[in-house]
Image (cartoon, helix red, strand yellow):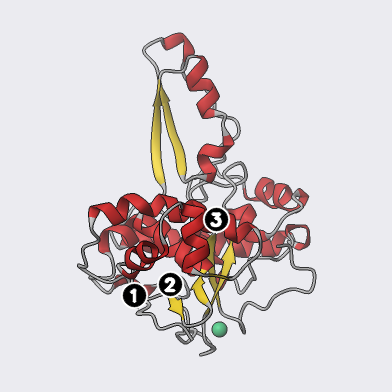
């Protein structure tokens, strides 16, 4: 078993040169992950990143010890760790200034959302161009205008997994990786549950769970779990106390005591209780 601290090594300073190489490792790891490989050697990572193996081991040692002897690095965990270090797990609300051709193209570019850049607003000095509806970005569940029935119907029409749908801003906005895991735990649903099996009642449960998680985060002074996670960095103990599954690999489920598991999901991680959130037979993803 890999020897790792689990928590973010608080206060540990990563040398600038090593930080500068993290994107190289990140890209290399994504490449490895696409091949459905769980572990990777420092030598292989070195070749992919164009760095020598000793350097790889040294750089990654700053992130904590994630290497399993004789097996290599755990790919999903390292991706999660590096993306957190680089701030990629964080949602970055953006405002697009200028709604000319480029602004339009950017606002309609779905890849932006997939990379954590959430378009909050479009601004332009030309009043004729405003307000510009960003048709593909859905309302967030706390918005009084949010259409629950419409969401349930749209969800059912999707042929995808439930968590993927929750992260899809064309369906619902404001739900990031952490919110999604926490909401799914509350609703006792597996992230890979096919959306086609989501009844209206189930959909309402997921929405209620997502709202509860969001309200709780707001009550704790954060705009989102993601920003709290980055800012607090575990120091206040907020996450130790409040999060049910996210980042709690190997710790007991707060409801049933089964040990929380972490799984590879869309180049990130998903956390769930293996007992409360059983994998459906027709799992999607
Ligand atoms: Zn449980």
Q: Position of residue 36 (x, y in %)?
A: 66, 64
Residue 247 shows which numbered tag?
2
Classify mark 1: helix, strand or loop.
Answer: loop
Disc 1 or 2, which lies upstream in sequence? 1
Rendering coords of residue 267 (x, y %): 55, 58
User: For this rendering, which residue is in front, 254 or 91?
Assistant: 91
SS at mark 2?
loop
Name the residue tied to disc 3.
30
Q: Nearer the viewer, residue 160 or 16?
A: 16
Q: Which residue is mark 1?
A: 7
Q: Quadrant of residue 40?
A: bottom right
Q: CA distance from mark 1 to mark 2?
A: 8 Å
Q: Residue at x 32, y 67 (%)?
A: 58
* Cα distance in 3D space between marks 3 and 2: 20 Å
**Foreground label between 1 and 3:** 3
Mark 1 and mark 2 residues within 8 Å of each other at the beta carbon: no
Near mark 1 (Cα within 10 A), the count class, few <14, some 14-19 or many ≥20, is: few
Observer able to see residue 70? yes
- Residue that extends furthest to the bottom in the rendered view of this protein: 257
- The percent coordinates of residue 46 (x first, y second) are 46, 59
The quarter of the image holding the C terminus is bottom right
Q: Secondary structure at mark 3?
A: helix
Q: From the viewer's perspective, is the residue at label 1 or at label 2 nearer?
A: 1
Q: Is residue 63 above or below residue 166?
A: below
Q: Residue at x 39, y 41 (%)?
A: 93
Mark closest to the chain's N terminus, 1 or 3? 1
From where the camera sits, is residue 182 visible? Answer: no
Local crowd at mark 2 within 10 Å, few (<14), some, or many (≥20)?
Answer: many
Q: Quadrant of ligand 1?
A: bottom right
Q: Nearer the viewer, mark 3 or mark 2?
A: 3
Q: Earlier in the sequence, mark 3 or mark 2?
A: 3
Q: Is residue 145 left or right of residue 190?
A: left
């Amino acid at each position: 078993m890999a020897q790792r601290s689990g928590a973010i090594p608080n206060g540990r300073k990563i040398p600038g040169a090593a930080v500068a190489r993290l994107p190289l490792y990140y890209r290399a790891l994504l490449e490895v992950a696409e091949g459905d490989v769980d572990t990777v050697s420092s030598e292989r990572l070195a070749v992919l990143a164009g760095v020598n193996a000793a350097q790889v081991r040294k750089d990654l040692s700053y992130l904590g010890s994630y290497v399993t002897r004789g097996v290599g690095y755990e790919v999903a965990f390292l991706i999660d760790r590096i993306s957190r270090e680089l701030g990629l797990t964080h949602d970055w609300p953006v405002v697009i200034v200028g709604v000319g051709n480029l602004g339009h193209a950017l606002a309609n570019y779905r890849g932006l959302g997939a990379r954590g850049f959430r378009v909050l607003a479009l601004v332009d000095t030309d009043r004729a161009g405003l307000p510009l509806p960003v048709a593909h970005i859905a309302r967030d569940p706390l918005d009084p205008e949010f259409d629950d029935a419409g969401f349930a119907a749209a969800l059912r029409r999707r042929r995808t997994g439930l968590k993927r749908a929750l992260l899809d801003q064309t369906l619902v906005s404001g739900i990031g990786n952490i919110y999604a895991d926490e909401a799914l735990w509350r609703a006792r649903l597996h992230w890979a549950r096919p959306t086609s099996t989501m009844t209206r009642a189930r959909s309402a449960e997921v929405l209620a769970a997502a709202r509860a998680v969001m309200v709780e985060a707001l009550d704790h002074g954060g705009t989102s779990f993601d920003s709290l996670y980055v800012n607090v960095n575990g120091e206040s103990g907020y996450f130790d106390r409040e999060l049910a599954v996210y980042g709690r690999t190997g710790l007991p489920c707060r409801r049933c005591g089964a040990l929380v598991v972490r799984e590879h999901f869309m180049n990130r991680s998903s956390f769930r209780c293996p007992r409360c959130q059983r994998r459906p037979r027709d799992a999607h993803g």
